[in-house]
Amino acid sequence: MQPYELTLADAAQQIRARRLSPVELVDSVLDRIDQVDPHVEAYVAVTAEQARGAAREAEQEAARGVFRGPLHGVPAGLKDLIDVAGSPTSASSRVRAGHRAAADSTVAARLRAAGSVLVGKTHTHEFAYGLTTPQTGNAWDRGRVAGGSSGGSAVAVAAGAATFALGTDTGGSIRVPAALNGVVGFKPTYGLVPRHGVTSLSWSLDHVGPVARTVEDAALVLTVLAGHDPRDPASLDTPAFDHRPEREPDLAGVRVGVPRNYYFDRVDAEVETAVRRGIAQLETLGAQLVEIDIPMTRYIQATQWGLMVPEATAYHEGTLRTVPELYQADVRILLEAGELMGAGDYLRAQRSRTLMQEEWARLLEKVDVIAAPAVPMTAVKAGQESVTWSDGSTEAVSDAYVRLSSPANITGVPALSVPVGHDTVGMPIGMQLLGRPFGERQLLRVGHAYERTQPARSLAPTV
């Protein structure tokens, strides 16, 4: 096994035991980037020279017995919305040409302090305003979409071009590409991970979280990222906490909600079969399955768009009026549409969110975790704009991908996407687990317990 193939947890164990050098690991990942990135274009920029310098520093510290934790010397990619001092933050947009960050974002600073090594900035759908990341190819099939908007981060991890990566999630932008590329994506509770220094799409819906190979890896990263920062108005003053999942041999006593409505409506048959098989595995592990009804389903998409569209337009107001031609057509149309939305529409969306949060809180008193598909279909072919369902209805690809992930953004609950297999053409399928606010450890416990029953996953055959 090459070093780039190691999970974060395995790499950390080997570095601590001095069986693996951070220099070896970073060189292996950089070589892998050289090999695969011309095919998938996960990276906006690769910071090879700086990464090798940081790896040498991590190696020297290890030689002195200084070990900063499980991220020490481990290479990571950061979505190109996340500021790193002295580096460009382009948001994959011509609007940001020439921009350089003056200081680290909170999450970049915390990764640096934990000893992680930045190997590059990963592509996003322009300003995170989309679900496909069109410049990046899926790690399993270059001719299919990567998912978005954190497509570059998910593809880099799936291809072995990063041991882990950070993404952002406003309507599913971590979980969607994670599911489509066969890796783990985690959106924490709203306010748990600070967003200071991260380019916003929609401030009341934005989250920062990890993309990783395993649930345990995601938990290790989350433990470093979480914690209060007063520079983010939404950041919550919560105590430091080790989010690594408990290692109970079973899930006895855990109530898993299985939706009767919404989450299995207009879902590809192969996706439904794989997810229900995953849910059955949770029952085998001792979980109690409880059928539930998802509340206020007719308002979900209207609430998501009613919040996101005007907030995004407000953020871009200046550049939209001065350099509109620099935006990609799909993003510009959405930003211009936001100028047509009235204050009443935005306020109604906020009221709807409040009611939805209350209803979900009541729902999550009945169950500990909800299990459902992460996305309704696997990765579609690049350029495909719509999907036709078995009932004859047609849906835009972007609407389909956001439909099952956006409830967690509206309500702010934590949500985890875990791979549960592949369809008949070999494309990955993801199961989504949703939990109570600040119920990260329970959620990660369930995902980890499921994961331990499955064969070890291989990296995507990108080349």
Image (cartoon, helix red, strand yellow):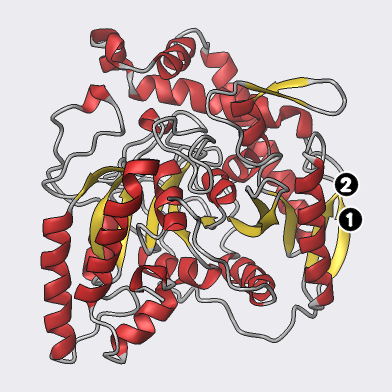
* Residue 8 coordinates in the image, percent (x, y): 41, 72
- Asked whether the viewer can see residue 131, the reply is yes
* Residue 136 coordinates in the image, percent (x, y): 41, 37
**Residue 221 falls left or right of residue 76:** right
Quarter of the picture holding the N terminus: bottom left
Given residues 248 and 16, the one toward you in this image is 16
Mark 2 element type: loop
Residue that mark 2 sits on: 260
For mark 1, does the 10 Å Cα neighbourhood hold few (<14), some (14 to 19), or many (20 or more) residues?
few
* Residue 275 coordinates in the image, percent (x, y): 76, 55
The residue depicted at 47 percent of the width and 16 percent of the height is: 334
Q: Is the Cβ of the residue at disc 2 closer than 8 Å to that at disc 1?
A: yes
**Residue 350 falls left or right of residue 403:** left
Closer to the chain start, of discs 2 and 1, is: 2
The residue depicted at 77 percent of the width and 55 percent of the height is: 274
Residue at the front extreme of this rendering: 463
Residue that mark 1 sits on: 291
**Residue 37 falls left or right of residue 139:** left
Q: What amino acid type is highlighted by mark number 1?
A: Glu
Label 2 – label 1 distance at C-alpha: 6 Å
Q: Quadrant of residue 402?
A: top right
Q: Which mark is residue 181?
A: none
The residue depicted at 43 percent of the width and 50 percent of the height is: 463
Q: What amino acid type is highlighted by mark number 2?
A: Arg
* Residue 257 coordinates in the image, percent (x, y): 81, 58
Given residues 324 and 110, the one toward you in this image is 324
The residue depicted at 46 percent of the width and 76 percent of the height is: 242
Mark 1 element type: strand
- Asked whether the viewer can see residue 435, the reply is no
